[in-house]
Amino acid sequence: MTVEKLCNSIYLGDRYCEKVIIKDNIIMFQINLISRIKEGAREWEYYNDKDLENGFLVFDNVINYTIDNGSTINDEIEVHYINNDNGNYYFIVEGAEYQNDANTYKWVKFEIKCRDFYLLHNNTKIRE
């Protein structure tokens, strides 16, 4: 499965980001539940056979990244595959950063350029 197809197979509606880990050349977003869209379907349709509880979106071999309007994502999250330029993948990851009072939030945008993208669940890389 291509990186674009993998990214487009992810459903994150009604899900939230538990934490963001940035270390060396890896950015990981831990999601409370990552669902997958069934092969051949255009929408999620409540397909749960490939759900990943507490799974990660992993952007590996990060070339560069920027974070606009905040510092982290700790609630709703969206991931958008933008393009592939000679094996370098470009993504936009957006989500809410709630403040301590839980009444104030801002929409944060990560722009990520990397060489690899996959899901991680129970120490297993998922590429399809």
Image: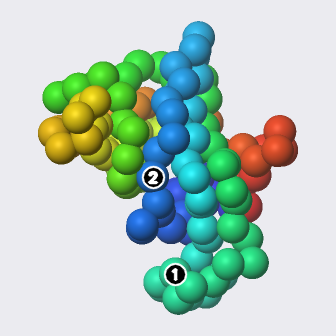
Give the amino acid type for the residue marked by disc 2 in the picture. Answer: Tyr
Residue at horizontal 76%, vertical 47%? 121
When the figure is inspected, residue 38 is found, relative to residue 3, above or below; the finding is below
Q: Nearer the viewer, residue 71 or 119?
A: 71
The residue nearer to you, when weighing 35 against 66, is 35
Q: Is residue 94 visible?
A: yes
Q: Quadrant of residue 6?
A: bottom right
Residue where numbered disc 1 is placed? 44
**Side (left or right) of 81 relative to 97:** right
Q: In front: 57, or 98? A: 98
Give how far across and how far down residue 109 sits, in percent.
26, 37
The residue under the point 45% across, 52% down is 16
| Disc 2 from disc 1: Cα separation | 17 Å
Circle 2 residue? 16
Picture layout, residue 23 above or below residue 103: above
**Coordinates of residue 53 in the picture (x, y in percent):** 69, 57
Residue at the (60%, 68%) spot, across then down? 35
The quadrant in which residue 111 appears is top left
Mark 2 or mark 1: name the one nearer the start of the chain.
Answer: 2
Q: Relative to the observer, which residue lies in front, 106 or 56?
A: 106
Question: Secondary structure under badge 2?
Answer: loop
Which image quarter holds the C terminus? Answer: bottom right
> For residue 104, which quarter of the picture?
top left
Disc 1 marks which amino acid? Trp
Q: Is residue 53 above or below residue 110?
A: below
